Amino acid sequence: MNVSYSTRQREAILDILRRADQPLTPGEIRERANQDSAGIGLATVYRALKAFMARGVIAQVEIPGASPCYEMADRGHHHHFICQHCQRVYDLPGCVRDLEALAPRDFQVQRHEVILYGLCSNCLER
């Protein structure tokens, strides 16, 4: 999506989300932004995320019991894996099939979320 955003800081934040291979928390976004261009505060990250959400450019990933994460909205339907040690959230490709068969008779499934919990490869090696 080639949309111009008003500040260099917002462009940097959006670029981080574009390059990320997983949803990121505001703290992770700030950390990555400060590796590239020092001086981006957490309040700036939150303001940028709010603006991007209002425009439909990014999506919030809500995981029960975890901080909200953010990812590009154009990633399509997918699910997530959460490492129970480091708490990082990872994208899972694709979708589980035939979930409608799990619903009770005469119920209509309108949407779903599948979250897998375990240890990521980095934590497993420790």
Image (cartoon, grey):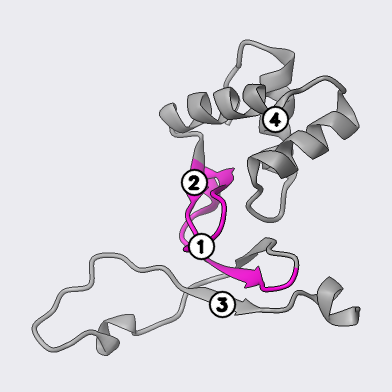
Q: As rendered, which of 126 and 7 lies closer to the eye?
A: 126
> How far apart are labels 4 and 2 at the CA level?
15 Å
Q: How many marks?
A: 4
Residue 69 at x, y percent in the picture: 58, 49
State which tag comes first along the sequence, 4 or 3.
4
**Identity of the residue drawn at 26% across and 89% down:** 101
Question: What amino acid type is highlighted by mark number 3?
Answer: Leu
- The reply, left or right, for residue 109 in relation to residue 59 is left
State which tag comes first along the sequence, 2 or 3.
2
Q: Is the C terminus in the top left, top right, bottom left or bottom right quadrant? A: bottom right
Q: Nearer the viewer, mark 1 or mark 2?
A: 1
State which tag comes first along the sequence, 1 or 3.
1
The residue furthest top is: 6
Question: What amino acid type is highlighted by mark number 4?
Answer: Ile
Q: Which residue is mark 2?
A: 60
Q: Secondary structure at mark 4?
A: helix
Q: Which residue is mark 1?
A: 65
> How far apart are labels 2 and 3 at the CA level?
18 Å
**Identity of the residue drawn at 26% across and 82% down:** 100
Query: Looking at the image, do the residues carrying marks 2 and 3 touch, with CB atoms under 8 Å apart?
Result: no
Q: Which residue is mark 3?
A: 116
**Residues shaded magenta:** 59-85
